[in-house]
Amino acid sequence: MDLFNSALGKNITFVRPAYFIISGFIGIPNINYYYVFLFFVYVVSVLGNTAVMALIYLDYNLRTPKYVAVFNLAFVDLIGSSALVPKVIDIFLFNHPSIPYSDCLTFLFTCSTCLWMQSFNLVALSYDRLVAIIFPLHYQVKVTHRLMFSLIAFFWVLAITITLIATGFITRLSFCESVVINSYYCDHGQMYRLACNDNTPSFVMAKLGPVLTLWLPLAFILLSYSYIGYALSKIATVQERVKAFKTCTAHLSLVTIYFIPVLITFTMNANIHPNARIINLSLTSVFPPMLNPIIYVLQTQEIKMSLKKILKMRKQSKIAAKKVIIK
């Protein structure tokens, strides 16, 4: 951050507080039950995403380019929810609302990067479905491990760069008056509004960031499915159309669950009540990570087959162990 602050080559003094205070919900009684609910959602998320990652790692048949993206999605969900929920529990259930300045920036960086990576992962999976349906005979050539790893790496670099710039601009702000952040974490949109000096760069990033990380990915996904819908309309039988479209239902479910609440929040921006912003962002941060593995297990044939195979192998090993003990 010091390098960033000196990038202009000027000796500028900024007023930086020792800590920020996370306010959480305003005027809602018994709100602690909501944080307990978030904790249980987090536990389910950790178990589900760990299970999906383990299945992909253990089953050689799942080591395909598509499941590179699925593994990364589960990894991002696990890291993002683990960075957020335990800290939220500590802040509100254990009454530690103050957070040091540097820790707050780290908190902002981690949560924002994982939030954007969820969006980019959905783009990678959208590209996979597009090629699989439009160019089924060339799928193995067009969607390779190298391409998927390169795509995921590019998205990581992009998400980290965008978040670093936004966080860097926060370090250029002075906080002379209030240090109370009206959110449930170190929310960029709420933080830069507390500044008592020019916050134009942060304002620009607050507008440009969602365009780069939400609207453009969503536009690509919608265009992909428009093309997929057009291609499926050329297929002769309804049964073939339904069969092809079923391979997209899991991905479409994830897109809907992720984008609707987060776009409402970032579109309304300052016009949304702090409580509504907290609910939207918190549910966006914890619900998709919980539902993603459930959706993939229920709607993806390869995952279901892999799970059945591993459970069958475990059952057989137990039976064999019992026979050895009896002998």
Image: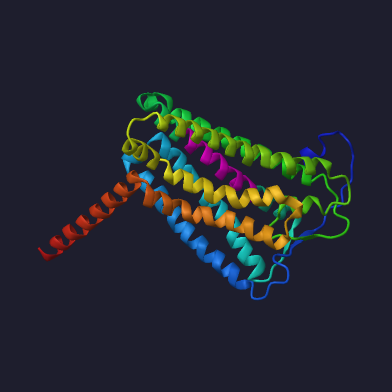
Q: Which residues are magenta?
A: 110-128
Q: Position of residue 213 (x, y in %)?
A: 63, 40
Q: Residue at x 41, y 32 (%)?
A: 233
Q: Position of residue 25 (x, y in %)?
A: 70, 66
Query: In the image, is residue 106 above or below residue 324?
Result: above
Q: Is residue 76 visible?
A: no
Q: Position of residue 155 (x, y in %)?
A: 57, 36
Can you name the residue that lies furthest to the left here? 327
Q: Quadrant of the N terminus?
A: top right
Q: Residue at x 61, y 44 (%)?
A: 116
Q: Is residue 290 visible?
A: yes
Query: In the image, is residue 110 above or below residue 165?
Result: below
Question: 183 or 75: nearer the eye?
Answer: 183
Question: 216 or 181: nearer the eye?
Answer: 216
Residue 122 within the magenta-colored segment of the rendering: yes
Question: 280 or 167: nearer the eye?
Answer: 280
Magenta segment, prevailing SS (helix, strand or loop): helix
The number of numbered discs placed on residues in the rendered structure image is 0
Residue 279 within the magenta-colored segment of the rendering: no
Q: Quadrant of the C terminus?
A: bottom left
Side (left or right) of 124 relative to 67: right
Side (left or right) of 316 relative to 13: left
Q: Residue at x 60, y 47 (%)?
A: 115
Q: Position of residue 262 (x, y in %)?
A: 62, 50
